[in-house]
Structures are given as C-alpha cells and as structure tokens.
Image (cartoon, helix red, strand yellow):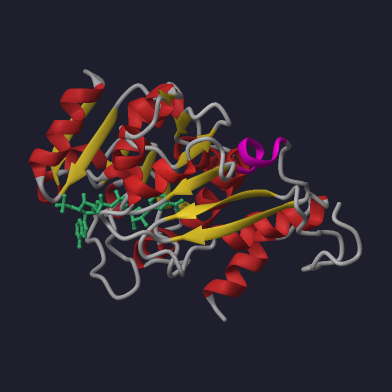
Amino acid sequence: MAGSLAPTWGDTSLITGASIVAGVVGRPVAHSLSPILHNAWLEAAGVDGVYVAFSPDALGFERFVRGMRGGAIRGVNVTLPFKEAALGLADQVSDAARRAQAANLLIFDTDGQVYADNTDGVGLLGAFAAQAPQYDVTAGPSVVLGAGGAARGAVSALLAAGSPRVWIVNRTLEKAEAIAADLGRNVSALPLNHAVGAFRDTRAIINATSAGLSGQGSLDIPLELTPEDTVVMDMVYKPLETPFLKQARDLGRATVDGLEMLIRQAEPSFEAFYGQPPPKGVDVRGLALKALNP
Ligand code: NAP
C-alpha cells in the first residue's frame, strides 16, 4: 500500500504503486461495459487493481501488444475488431481460442510470453446455466445464426460441451460452409432463407449475428416452428430485449440474453488478471443495466 496519499476511488480500493493493471482493448471501446464489471468486483474484493480501456487504431494493435510484452500490464480482454489478430500475436494459445480462431483474453507474462485464451464459450454456456438451467446441450441439435467470429466461437463451445449437431445458418452461405468444413462432421451450414428444417427439432437457437443491435435491421426467423421447449438466446444486449428475444418471449419460449453472456465471460478473465475469482454478491448486472439505460 502506498499510504494515505494514494488516491482513493471507492470505500475499499486503493490504486497504489503495486496495483495490478488490466483492461479491454477494442475500437470503438468507449461503450464497453467491461470496466464497470471489473472495477465493481475489484472494489468489492478490496483488490489493489484497476481495469481500463485502450483503443489503438486499426494498425496500432500489433504495436500495442508488442509494447505490453514483458508484463507492462497484466493482460487485456480483446473486443472488436482485434479478436482474430490477438490470436495471431500470441506465443501460446488455449484450445478454446484455437477452436474459436479468436482470442478475447491476452495475458502478458513477465518473461515476455503472450498467452491467448477465449472465454466467450464459457460465457455463452454460463449464461444458459444461469437463465435457462433446464437446457441440456447434449440433448439435441442447436442452431447458431451468423458466421462471424462470435458464431464460430459459439459453435466450437457447443461442440466441446457435447452438442450432437450444430446448424450454422447465415445470410452468406459460403461463410457458414467455411466454418462447418473446419469444425467437423457434426456441423452443417444452411442459408438464412432456407433453414426451416433446422428449426423443427432444435433445442436452442443462438443469435450470433449483429442484427438487432441498436439501429440495425432485425432477423426474420420463424421461431413458431421450433419446439416449445427451445431456448432462444441473443448475443446482442443493446437493447437488452432485442426484437428477436421479444418474438421468443411472445411465443412463450425461454430466453437468455447477451448481457448475461458478457458477465459470465468476464468472470474467468477477472481471475486470470487478478488471481482470484470475482467476489460473490456484487450486482454487476444492475450496474451494467444502469449504464445501458442511463
Ligand atoms: P461479425 O464477425 O461482424 O459477424 C456478423 C454476422 O452477422 C455475419 O454472419 C453477418 O452475416 C450477420 N449479419 C449482420 N447483419 C445481419 C442482418 N441484418 N441479417 C442477417 N445477418 C446479419 O460479428 P461478430 O464478432 O461475430 O459478432 C456478432 C454479434 O455478437 C455482435 O453484435 C457482437 O456484439 C455480439 N457479441 C456479443 C458477445 C457477448 O458477450 N454478449 C460476445 C461476442 C459477440 P453475413 O456473413 O451474411 O454478412
């Protein structure tokens, strides 16, 4: 502790000369909820640490990672558009990051090594466990809408958790086919406008497109064709209730929201940065909702 002259920013936390520094890197990043989650946990746990946002320009990300080598800071979460680049800049890559072909977590060891991981899959499955505990990933097929980085991560996490079949449904079929070809014979690709067959016996539908994000067009999916016990999840959390989730709720389907996924992926990241799990009982969801709806 640096003593009484250290600046305080909460009842229990101090930022001192020994503070563990971590953060999130993305562009844009100012809207990120991650600093709110991590700093609330730090404060509640009385950990001498801080979590801040970094936003290098598109060409500056590699320089940023190079500069952090050797442990200038402990690590970063990585968000759009740097997740794929982050994987390529790491010296060691976890299985989850390799399967997702993207990293949302970089740890900078003091020996200069950079370690890449991906906690989005843990976040996805954790969100289902929290909001739809009746969902059993092994019990039947799942549908993932989209074929970007988030979709690929979701498909690989579902397979790793024992899903017997995953349908990737995307507007641009070739992108879905490329993921299916890469992730094995239990994955199949369908175009968005000819996917009815996939909906009839699915246990879960996950929106991993950016449709529904504030100001963007929403999806037109015949959710009424799905079995009544299908769980519907949307990775988009701005707005919290997307048109897709509203459609699901109106049909009486159980739903899982993207904010829960964000919180659940942050938990293992916190532990990787600060060496302990986040403290229990902090209403980070409430804080995040306040930030989403000021
Ligand atoms: P991405 O690589 O840009 O992929 C976007 C996907 O959305 C593409 O497959 C694209 O289809 C599809 N798409 C976009 N607009 C569409 C529309 N109007 N109708 C149908 N399809 C549409 O993005 P990403 O990194 O995978 O992320 C996807 C979303 O997940 C983002 O909104 C991101 O914020 C969210 N996300 C949330 C979390 C969380 O923790 N909650 C974590 C990761 C990502 P085409 O291939 O045809 O262009």
Return the x and y of residue 222 as percentages of the image width and height.
Answer: 24, 55
Q: Is residue 113 above or below residue 281?
A: above
Q: Main secondary structure of the magenta part?
A: helix
- Is residue 168 visible from the viewing direction of this image? yes
Give the camera-side residue of 158 and 75. 75
Q: Hey, which quadrant is residue 154 in on the image?
A: top left
Q: Which image quarter: residue 189?
A: top left
Position of 260 relative to 33 (above/below): above
Which of the 4 quarters of the picture holds residue 98?
Answer: top left
Task: Identify the residue at image location x=8%, y=39%.
Answer: 174
Q: Nearer the viewer, residue 16 or 271?
A: 16
Q: Position of residue 220 (x, y in %)?
A: 22, 61
The residue lying at 26 percent from left, 66 percent from top is 218
Task: Give the mark count.
Answer: 0
Check the image and name the residue furthest to the bottom. Answer: 294
Placement of 111 over or under 103, stated as above or below: above
Q: Quadrant of the C terminus?
A: bottom right
Q: Is residue 39 left or right of residue 106?
A: right
- Outermost right residue: 4
Position of residue 251 measured from the top left corner of the image (x, y, whole percent): 40, 59
Find out whether residue 154 is within the magenta segment: no
Residue nearer the viewer, 198 or 272: 272
Foreground residue among 26 and 60: 60
Q: Is residue 222 left or right of residue 127?
A: left
Magenta range: 270-275
- Residue 139 seen in the current view: no
- Measured as percent of width and height from the top left, residue 219 is found at 24, 61
Q: Residue at x 39, y 31 (%)?
A: 90
